[in-house]
Amino acid sequence: MKILKATRIAPGIVSGPVFFFERNKWPIPRYLVASGETERELRRFQEAIAKADQELNQVRGLVLSGLSKEHALLIDAQLMALRDTDLHRAVETLVCQRRYNILRAYVEVMTRYAKTLAETVNAYHQERLVDLHDVMKRVIHHLSVKRDYTIPRLREPAIFVSERLSPTDLINLHNQRALGIVTQVGGVDSHAGILARAFNLPYVSGLLEMEELRNCPRIILDADEEAVHLNPSRETELTFSSRLQAFRQTKEQISFQEAPPLPMVTEKVEVLMNASFVTEIEAVAPTLFPGIGLFRTEFLCLERNAIPDEQIQYRAYSKILNAARGKIVTFRTFDFGREKLFALLNIEALQKESALDNWGGIGFCLDNPEILITQLRALFRASRHGAMQIMIPLVTGIDQIRATLAITEAARANLGKTVAPASAKIPFGIMVETDTILEQLDAAAKLVDFFSVGTNDLALFLLGSRRDATLVKNYYHPLIFRALDKIITAGQRHNIPVTVCGEMAADPFGALGLLALGYHSLSINANALPTIRELASSLDLHALGQLRTALIEAADAISIYNLLKDFRNRASHPD
């Protein structure tokens, strides 16, 4: 039996068959159409081109408003490829003269053209290959009668193996009862990674030996130990059986079964839940969480590959509030960071553009105020269905807070009498996750009702890590602990609540560190709820608080980790 190493993205251990999926190798149907059906095929082609054209124009507007005309030229190149009349005529010829079905005709013409470009020595033509590929994906998506051509379909519950994974892929795989995920490319802080943790799907990435899994019938995916066991023997399966069963039982705990309420501790610890879909809220026992500390609204867009209109958003937010059954829901406005923007725009040509690195969060929405106004109107209208808070992501300065508050008031005022009245008072807060806002906490606290700390992005900004870097241990860094201490101190000074909703709060040792600094509100993915609830209920918070000075004065991450580990060991095994 061979063991391959990879990087953990989402924890857990599973065993099962392999579903190997090669991206961009579509099973295109090939058949001849009757003479009376050619017009219908060509009409479908024109409709697909029109839809793709509309999408690219929307993308161009977003890029132009947030960047520059030079970056919009990348989209112009795709529009040119999409509208190429020579390509259109070649497709029409294959349909009318040879009676090819439209998908076969289009793919054949585009493949032939791509081959010609690949053989040229002209650098401009070589670069157009990426544009051609993006356009081809988009048109095939609209031409496909069945989405099987662009979306992987599992034949049975299996472990999905592919070069990369989009958030849309992961949503579909979860709905198909995928057991786990293995990819070659993907980061801990990616949206697919966030989703995998939310869905409790074990996930590893950075696996270089992908080809060894192509014909491998069965594997054990041990994300906890960052290992993939190929063709395990019956004896090996038995060795892992207790851990496999324990993981299955953990998943079953996150269900509609009644869970006991959180026992009282020395001081109240609020363990909230992070969510991206209404189904996550519906699937968790109501007694497991007192509210939703983070609802990621951008997944409404990723599900549709477009930004929904006000009515669609209103219905979605209303459904979420109803599912929460009176518990408060903290809605984060659209957070389109670099990786998230790529997932929405679905354009590979933009991925090499470093200018997009810091284009995201509330900055993106302020550059596109109509998007923010529409979302706020939908949220205000939905507020009569339950308790809500609104917070804005990736704030870099006070000016962004003031600008958002102005838009918020305008959106509320513009509701008028045409819709149901919004809740009288909706708390407004910010995500504290950039280095620049750390220097403006006192001014920010005077403008908002609460802080929410995003430890994932905070680590990226303070430590200079890239988004695709492995971030598993970054939050033990002394710089992170000192920043966290600064944030909670500012919140206490201005008497506003502070919650942590990053991955750090879901790590038992990370949660210990947060509680030691004085944080008493944590928001985590559903799969971590039982563990962190149990941890919080068993602690002596007064004794834990004695670690605060040592943590913020520690010299390195190892020292911090050892302080927390030693405290946990002493608490678990008192003399």
Image (cartoon, rainbow, N blue to C red):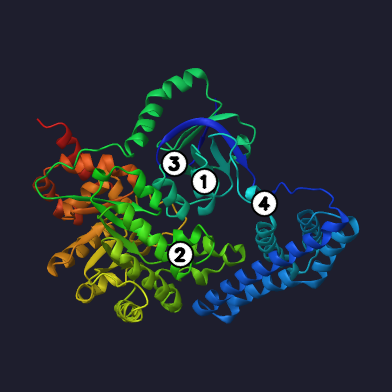
Q: Distance between the residues labelled 1 and 4?
A: 20 Å
Image quadrant for the C terminus? top left
Q: Quick one: SS at disc 4?
A: loop
Q: Which amino acid does label 3 sit on?
A: Leu
Closer to the camera: disc 1 or disc 2?
A: 2
Closer to the camera: disc 1 or disc 3?
A: 3
Q: Which amino acid does label 1 sit on?
A: Gly
Closer to the camera: disc 3 or disc 2?
A: 2
Q: Earlier in the sequence, mark 1 or mark 4?
A: 4
Q: Is 308 in front, or is 221?
A: 308
The residue carrying mark 1 is: 206
The residue carrying mark 3 is: 201
From the top left corner, tell me how far across and down residue 110 is, in percent: 77, 60
The residue carrying mark 4 is: 24
Q: How crowded is mark 3: few (under 14 residues within 10 Å), some or many (20 or more)?
A: many
Q: Residue 458 appears in which quarter of the rendering?
A: bottom left
Q: How far apart are marks 3 and 2 (CA)?
A: 28 Å
Image quadrant for the N terminus? top right
